[in-house]
Image (cartoon, grey):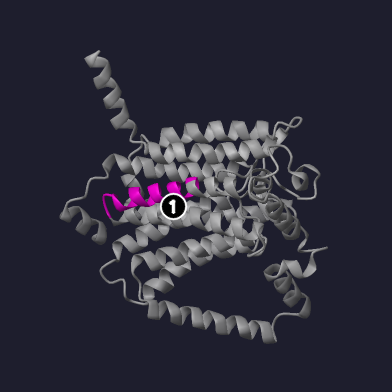
């Protein structure tokens, strides 16, 4: 019996899983699956999502056994940046056009959206760059150089066009710049230059139809029969849920097809209609625990690289959560951003659990590093 207990403790230590984080994700996954299925008829989305969830969880546990200190190497970071850029460029030649966006590789039996894992690459790039320069971080060139790395990937995603993923990439860069301690004065100057540049483009470059597209994107409810139809129906669904919801399977907006894509972009609205305000509070609670545990693990990182990586991962999830909820309740433009762990799709689930799996792998060596290790990291 004692030998069995020792073996269990050894396995528990080797796996190095944050079980609070893991068990907080499961109700969110369940909420998405129930909303897709709702026990009414058969749902191909539900069945496929079960497969994606199972594969993602297997990947999550497998990655937790890996020592990810090799990600600190400059050669690895350069390779990730070049491979990501080439894959995104390949989309313009081999990508499949879906709803006007050339963002997917179609392999027949499944499709893959590279912009999801590329967000993790941006986090790793920023973590590496800022972890080496935290002593001289006040220099404005670090905003410009880090911005260049992020801008290359941002433009390759933006031009697909995939505005939602491009927005998240920008938010990751901005969030990690702020976390790194860069001078807010210099950052404000960069944004001022960007704002002046946009105004000049708006006044002298953009054609009227281009201006109208931007206005429709920023204020879709101005045209509820056209560009704002999805946002309008989403707001109706959220509001009709009231306090306790209509009940599982009784969401009229989603089941009667008034709410488009309720399995993906608008799954939060479909969930809110069936579960109501009380269900939303529970969902927000579990999301809050997930973000808290990610930040908790980040703060116990061995070096600045691990701390910044965990912080970037939290920014990624918060960006997806805030933008998705915002567009579901009509406060933000409809950008096609998924709700973490809830929305249908394998690409974003794989990326989310890969990101968390890397974080769990970093827990294996989370003891504070010796001073000479940190100094060596700055010099390499």
Quadrant for the N terminus in the image: top left
Give yes or no for residue 170 being in the magenta stretch.
Answer: no
Q: So how many labels did they put on this image?
A: 1
**Relative vertical location of residue 311 with respect to residue 8 in this rendering, above or below:** below
Whole-percent x, y for residue 285 in the image: 48, 48
Secondary structure of the residue carrying tag 1 is: helix
The residue furthest top is: 1
Whole-percent x, y for residue 83 in the image: 50, 52
Whole-percent x, y for residue 228 in the image: 76, 63
Which residues are the magenta region? 286-303
Within 10 angstroms of label 1, few (less than 14), some, or many (20 or more) residues? few
The reply to whether residue 76 is in sight is yes
The reply to whether residue 162 is in sight is no
Whole-percent x, y for residue 98 in the image: 73, 51
Residue at point 72% right, 48% down? Answer: 261
Q: Main secondary structure of the magenta part?
A: helix
Give yes or no for residue 302 being in the magenta stretch.
Answer: yes
Q: Nearer the viewer, residue 26 or 362?
A: 26
Residue at point 67% right, 70% down? Answer: 218
The residue furthest front is: 243
């Amino acid at each position: 019996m004692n030998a069995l207990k020792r073996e269990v403790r050894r396995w528990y230590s080797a796996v190095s899983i944050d079980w609070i984080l893991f068990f907080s994700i499961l109700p969110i996954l369940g909420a998405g699956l129930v909303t897709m299925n709702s026990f009414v008829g058969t749902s191909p989305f539900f069945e496929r999502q079960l497969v994606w969830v199972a594969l993602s969880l297997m990947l999550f546990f497998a990655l937790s056994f890996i020592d990810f200190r090799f990600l600190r190497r400059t050669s690895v970071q350069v390779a990730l940046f070049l491979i990501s850029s080439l894959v995104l460029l390949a989309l313009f030649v081999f990508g499949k056009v879906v709803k006007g966006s050339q963002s997917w590789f179609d392999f027949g039996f499944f499709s893959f959206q590279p912009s999801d894992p590329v967000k993790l690459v941006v986090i790793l790039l920023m973590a590496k760059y800022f972890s080496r320069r935290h002593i001289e971080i006040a220099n404005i060139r670090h905003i410009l150089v880090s911005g260049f790395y992020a801008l290359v990937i941002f433009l390759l995603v933006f031009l697909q066009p995939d505005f939602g993923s491009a927005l998240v990439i920008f938010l990751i860069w901005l969030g990690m710049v702020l976390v790194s301690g860069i001078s807010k004065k210099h950052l404000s100057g960069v944004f001022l230059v960007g704002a002046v540049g946009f105004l000049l483009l708006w006044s002298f470059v953009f054609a009227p139809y281009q201006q109208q597209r931007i206005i429709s994107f920023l204020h879709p409810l101005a045209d509820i029969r056209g560009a704002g139809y999805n946002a309008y129906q989403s707001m109706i669904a959220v509001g009709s849920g009231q306090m306790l919801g209509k009940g599982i399977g009784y969401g009229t907006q989603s089941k009667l097809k008034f709410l488009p894509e309720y399995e993906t972009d608008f799954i939060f609205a479909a969930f809110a209609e069936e579960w109501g305000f009380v269900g939303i509070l529970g969902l927000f609670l579990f999301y809050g625990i997930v973000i808290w545990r990610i930040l908790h693990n980040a703060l116990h990182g061995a070096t600045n690289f691990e701390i910044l990586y965990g912080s970037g991962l939290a920014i990624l999830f918060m960006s997806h959560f805030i933008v998705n909820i915002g567009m579901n309740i009509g406060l933000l433009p409809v950008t096609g951003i998924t709700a973490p762990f809830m929305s249908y799709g394998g690409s974003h689930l794989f990326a989310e659990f890969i990101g968390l799996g890397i974080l769990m792998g970093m827990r294996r060596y989370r003891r504070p590093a010796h001073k000479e290790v940190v100094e060596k990291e700055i010099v390499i």
